[in-house]
Image: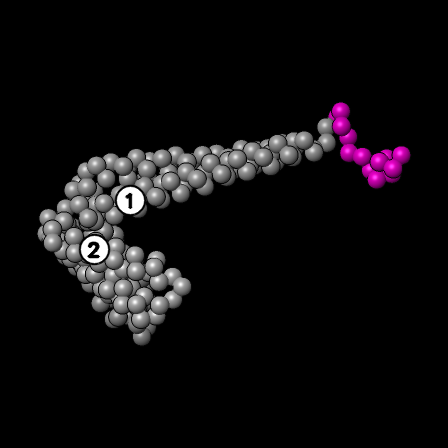
Amino acid sequence: MNESTAEGRKLSRGFGWLVLLGTLLVIAGVIGLVYTGVATLTSMLLFGWLLLVGGLVGLLHAIESRGTNYFWLAVVVAALNIAAGVVVIKHPEGTAEALTMFAALLFLTGGVFRLVGSVVVRGPQMGWTLLQGAFGLLLGLLVLFDWPHSSLYVLGCFFSLALLFDGLGLIAIGVGGRRIVSMVSERFDETAPTPDKPIKSPEDERK
């Protein structure tokens, strides 16, 4: 019983750390939504460092696998990641503008395809698809009309919303996990044998 209680406490502590991490992410997401410009630059710098570190790791793997057929391909991919990471870190504003333009074009093309597809197919979800297409088209146009100024807040807003929802998800998992562990521990304590309540054999129960 002591071992099971200790394991339950460890699990509960682990879920508590998830709640703490989720709370920090939620706070970071809210702050990012308030200061979208800072969130945009932060997301670009993180993106650049991820590319740079990923490129360096890929280059090390390529060196370790020299002599294989894909050696030069791995070197080229790693070099491109390193170069892209350096460019993003040195020019985060320009990178944000380019990615914002790319995102706006994705919204536009996705909205147009949904609108056209819903009209042509006329499926049971036609109304919902039309609404999604119209929303994507409108969002893409709004971002394009305000470009490049929209690059100061669009990516930061998306980044902050991702942090916010990830944090809420971790909090939900942590709270739910702690409740489950608590319920299982209480159930185990109720059914566990004690000196006052020894385990009864089937013969004793029949008596």
**Image spot of residue 131 (x, y percent):** 30, 56
Quarter where residue 206 is shown: top right
Instruction: Identify the amino acid type marked 1.
Output: Leu
Q: Which mark is residue 148?
A: none
Inspect this view and state whether residue 41 appears. no
Q: Residues within 10 Å of mark 2 (few under 14, many from 20)?
A: some
Residue drawn where x is 30% and y is 46% of the image? 162
Identify the residue under disc 1: 161
**Vertical relation: 24 (above or below) 104:** above
Quarter where residue 171 is shown: top left
Image: magenta residue range: 195-207
Q: Earlier in the sequence, mark 1 or mark 2?
A: 2
Residue 204 among magenta residues: yes
Identify the residue under disc 2: 138
Q: Give the left or right position of residue 201, taking residue 116 as reference.
A: right
Inspect this view and state whether residue 30 appears. yes
**Image spot of residue 194 (x, y percent):** 72, 28
Residue drawn where x is 30% and y is 35% of the image? 27
